[in-house]
Image (spheres, rainbow, N blue to C red):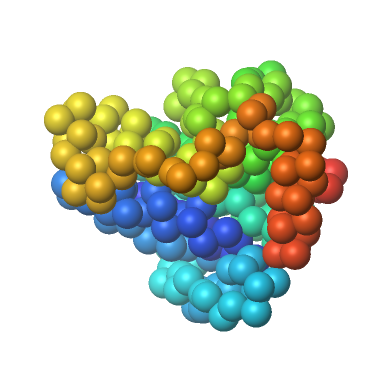
Amino acid sequence: MKIAILAYDRMTALDAVGPYEVLCRIPNALVQFVAETPGSIRTDTHGFHSNLAIHAEARLEDLPDPDIVLIPGGSTGTMEVMRSERALNWLRAAHATSQWTTSVCTGAFILGAAGLLQGLQATTHWASRDFLAQVGATYVAERFVRQGKIITAAGVSAGIDMALFIAGQTGGDDLAQALQLAIEYDPQPPYDTGAWERATPALMQRALREIRCAGGMEHMAPT
């Protein structure tokens, strides 16, 4: 099973690495990070004076027909990918033969820019939810939303939930449950503020400031 994770400048690391930790454990899976230009890809945490980077070992054209496509979100780099005909053409072609075409967080807007979300329900990071209509999709406040073979996950950590679902679909519930245990994914956060519907206005404003510090996309208007 060939799995392609798109890597691009100013992507969000956990959008990709969270699902990777699940998907790479599916038997006979080959996971590759692909990019327009292979090499070291810096993540959007550079706004926090971090130098975290992800290495993409392959060009887009090296993996034209993945079984699973995963598009992570990010900051302003996401908008650049939305304007890249090379990336969008690769995504359209890969989607034509994929078993699953997926996104995490604002990666949904890249799917939308490729014309894949028109008329569908979808989810994304809560701070960018109002913009989904601009790519033809209807926002749903869920951890992930499946529409046929397209799955969109909400912000950042929701990609792990989506990846476990895919593991269950491809290898059965026993495999998915074993993988969940293997990565000890048992969320018990010290605070109950992980969903925007439960947040106070003041907390939402503080969260938006934190997003802006990393060059986030709560203000993004897709083109």
Quadrant of image for the C terminus: top right
Vertical order, 59 against 39 (above or below): above
Residue shown at 41% from the left, 72% from the top: 57
Give the residue displayed 48% in from the left and 71% down from the top.
54
- In the image, 163 versus 114, the foreground residue is 163
- Does residue 126 appear left or right of residue 72 in this picture? right
Spot occupied by residue 40 in the image (x, y as percentages of width and height): 51, 78
Tally of marks: 0
Taking the image as shown, residue 167 lies to the left or right of residue 81, namely left
- Residue 189, image quadrant: top left
Q: Residue at x 57, y 59 (%)?
A: 12
Q: Residue at x 59, y 78 (%)?
A: 50
Q: Is residue 88 left or right of residue 94?
A: right
Give residue 76's position: percent from left, percent from top. 75, 60
Q: Is residue 44 visible from the viewing direction of this image? A: yes
Residue 7, compared with residue 165, is above or below; it is below
Query: Residue 25: percent from the left, percent from the top?
Result: 22, 51
Left/right placement of residue 54 relative to residue 165 reads right
Q: Is residue 29 visible?
A: no
Q: Quadrant of residue 48?
A: bottom right
Between 206 and 110, the one lying in front of the other is 206
Question: Residue 157: where, in percent of width, then height?
Answer: 48, 46
Asked if 153 appears above or below 31 in the picture, the reply is above
